Amino acid sequence: MKIALVFPGQASQYVGMGKDLAIGYRAAAEVFDAADRALDEPFHKLLWEGPEGDLNLTANTQPGVLTVSVAAWRVLQTARPKLEPAFLAGHSLGEYSAHVAAGTLTFADAVRAVRKRGQFMQEAVPVGVGSMAALIGMEPEAVAATCLEAAQGQVVVPANDNAPGQVVIAGHAQAVQRAINLAKTRGCKRALLLPVSAPFHCALMAPARQNLEPVLAGIRFSAPAWPVIANVDARPTSTAAEARDKLTAQVDSPVRWRETLLAFKEAGVDTIIEVGPGTVLCGLAKRVNKDWKLLNVENTESLEKTLAALA
């Protein structure tokens, strides 16, 4: 069995996530306690009780999804201490979870860093100025050409190449709308604006990258215990310096998730375990390779199913 662990990003959050793991497993409870200490607030209460509006604020969502993902990983690791993944990867924010799992950086450093990352990303563009949209049924090259034509002096670019036929674009709100209108005339099956508060992974995030750089420079990074496939180049990261540089560049660079999945396939991965809230990444994986065994760990029920499948 050749396993890849994948960690979800923003938009996978929901009120109550991780609570039953914390109740059932000390390894998970310790992660929530560590988050409370690192952020100097009763952060677990927001994750388990809401309100949803506050949880959906980027500065809370990012440390929240990271916390639940790391808690789920710690429980899986405790249950299967000899689990040796061939690769790890995370979608956007999830790359931080992957690096915590790989021992590249501590959970406390990561949770504080992504709290700041969320703040910087939100502050980079005033609400309403930017937007993101998913274009379904178009290939990346066609999306890139459509964005180029729709820009008209503004920013609109492919931001997430998620899976075959699913690309997310980001940029100035008017340019994104022009790209949507143009895409519909070019065979796009479905185009929908996403309910996000900022245009992530495009040039408009350059101020966030500049602000995040000194934060990451002040954190101690180690070489990952297992290769982490980076969003920016879909290639394995194996050194501390590389990990820091790629996480810095990631803020205003596109997420190359389809290529990450293809790298797994090429390397002979046969099992993918999504670790953290939701099963979005399992859904994307299915579009790349229907033969993969897809598992997940986000609560006690899914943990037990995954452990049975790994036995």
Image: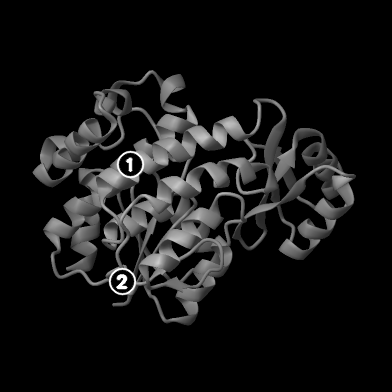
Q: Does residue 77 sit above or below 50 in this rendering?
A: below
N-terminal label among 2 and 1: 1
> Looking at the figure, which quarter contains the N terminus?
bottom left
Quadrant assignment, res 167 = bottom right
Front tag of 2 and 1: 1
The percent position of residue 39, horizontal first and vertical second, equals 29, 31
Residue denoted by label 1: 111
As measured in the structure, the alpha-carbon distance from the residue carrying label 2 to the one carrying label 1 is 21 Å
Label disc, if present, on residue 226 of the rendered structure: 2
Residue 303 in view, yes or no: yes
Q: Does residue 35 sit above or below 273 in this rendering?
A: above
Q: Horizontally, is 74 left or right of 148 in the view? A: left
Q: Residue at x 23, y 55 (%)?
A: 305
Question: In front here: 147 or 292?
Answer: 147
> Looking at the figure, which quarter contains the C terminus?
bottom left
Q: Residues within 10 Å of mark 2 (few under 14, many from 20)?
A: many
Q: Does residue 268 sit above or below 202 in this rendering?
A: below
Question: In front here: 255 or 252?
Answer: 252
Q: Residue at x 22, y 67 (%)?
A: 310
Quadrant assignment, res 68 = top left
The percent position of residue 217, horizontal first and vertical second, equals 41, 53
> Which residue is situated farthest in the left direction here?
26
Q: Horizontally, is 191 left or right of 41 in the view? A: right
Quadrant assignment, res 112 = top left
Q: Horizontally, is 224 left or right of 121 in the view? A: left
Residue 274 in view, yes or no: no
- Three-letter amino acid code at the position of disc 1: Val
Q: Residue at x 89, y 52 (%)?
A: 149
Q: Horizontally, is 7 left or right of 246 in the view? A: left
- Three-letter amino acid code at the position of disc 2: Trp
Instruction: For mark 1, give the secondary structure.
Output: helix
